[in-house]
Each structure stands twice: as structure tokens, then as C-alpha cells.
Amino acid sequence: MRIEPVKAFDDNYIWLLVSDGEAVCIDPGQSAPVAEYLQRNRLRLAQIWITHLHGDHTGGIEDLKKQFPDCRVFGGGDIAARTHDAAEGSVLDFAGCRAEVWAVPGHTDQHLAYLLHGSDGRLHVFCGDTLFSAGCGRVFSGTAQDLYRSLQRFDSLPPATLFYPAHEYTAANLDFAVHIEPDNSDIAAAQTAAADTPTLPVTLAHERRINPFLRIMQPAVRAAVRREMPETDDTPGARFAALRDWKNRF
């Protein structure tokens, strides 16, 4: 099985799992680029996995269902176009590989992630808008504390875990990260590497070095939040919420 990115809109990635003439599509915000890829590579769309309800992740579902009427669509209770429910603890299968479903609220209150145990022996996490490289999603219908707990859950995974966010926001996120930790040489190196270059997927080990939202306990991050918002309680959850609010205004 191989994992392929399909670009959509200005900065979206639609991820495809491909094996033996079939494909799984994750978060098709647009149908046209997916349909073109499938046709060019003579693939049948077998499944669609949806992380959350926002239109840039769901807008292409109906057109793809018309082209592939046997396609199964997995999503949470807020996904009207789903044909099958997905929720915490669900297990999906494709090409002999198993994908666990996690509930990771925060960006939205019913956001899901799909954790694929790949044939390469690695864990591949399709995380939608929960985790970005060097950043995380904004809070919409969830809460900052939900999002913090979801990221902490991701942070419990093996360091070699690969994350597949749905947006290429890395360069902008790194601008914020270096503002928080100007002496972090890993962030500086990541900025150089990210210049006009696709950065995804990313390993958890890499994100632990550069992502301020996974570095809440680091002295430099604590000090930066204290300087910017001195009224913030010195607890990890409060610090995370303050950092997320700061990023919104950055």
C-alpha cells in the first residue's frame, strides 16, 4: 500500500491510500482533483474516511459517491453524507491493514482521527485539523481543553509515528514557533527546510522538537506565555489555551 497526497484549494491535502487498484480517500474537500487522480491511475474508490464536518473536508463527497456508488463513507454523527458510522474504538480495514478510530475533539466537538497500522510496520495518523506541523487547529465547536487533551493523546504515540495533517500551514506556524522560542535551533532548521517545499507527513519526534503546542512544559514556552499573558494560570491546560489564543492574534 502507498499513501499519496492530492492537493486541493490553496493549501489542503487530500490523502489517498492506494493498493491493488483500489483507494481510500480521506477528507475530500473537492471531488475534481480526486476523480482526476483515480481516473489517471485506473483506481476504484472503495472508501472515504472523514475527520470532521467542515466543507473543505467534505465538499467532494456527494460527487464522488455519484461516480463510485458502492463507495463506503465513514464519519461521525455530524457527517450527513456518511454511509457507515465511525466513532472512538471503531476499526476499519483496507488492503490487509487495520485503522483505529480515535475521537479527538477540540477543533470541532466530533473530530475524528484515523490511525493506520501500515504494512511498513509504522503508525500513520490522519489527523485532519487537530495537529499541524508546528501548530494545531483553531477551536470552533470544541474547547481548548478538549484540544489540549487530544494533542496529549497524540503525544503518547511512538516517536516514529507519521502524521498526515489536512493543511500545509507549516511555514506560517514556524513563524509563530520561532517567535515563542527564538533560540530553538530545530525550529530554525525547519524554517529553512520548509521554504517553498512540501513538509508533510511529519514524525511525532520532529513535532516534539518544533511544535509549541506539544512543548507546553518547556521553560522557554512557559516564559513566553508568562511575558505575553502574565495573568495566565501556570498550569499546562491554561498555558495551552493562552498559547492558542495568542496564535489566533499573531
Image: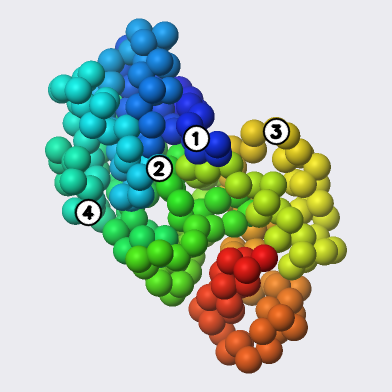
- Camera-nearest label, 1 or 3: 1
**Sequence-first tag of 1 and 2:** 1
Q: Is residue 122 above or below residue 23?
A: below
Coordinates of residue 1 in the picture (x, y in percent) = 41, 22
Verify CB contact (< 8 Å) between mark 3 and mark 2. no
Horizontal placement of 49 versus 4: left or right? left
Mark 2 residue element:
helix
| Front residue of 212 and 39 | 39
Coordinates of residue 54 in the picture (x, y in percent) = 35, 49
**Sequence-first tag of 3 and 4:** 4
Within-10-Å neighbours for mark 2: few <14, some 14–19, many 20+: some
Residue labelled with disc 1: 9
Q: Is residue 78 above or below residue 92?
A: below
**Sequence-first tag of 3 and 2:** 2
Coordinates of residue 125 in the picture (x, y in percent) = 44, 44
Name the amino acid, label 2.
Answer: Asp
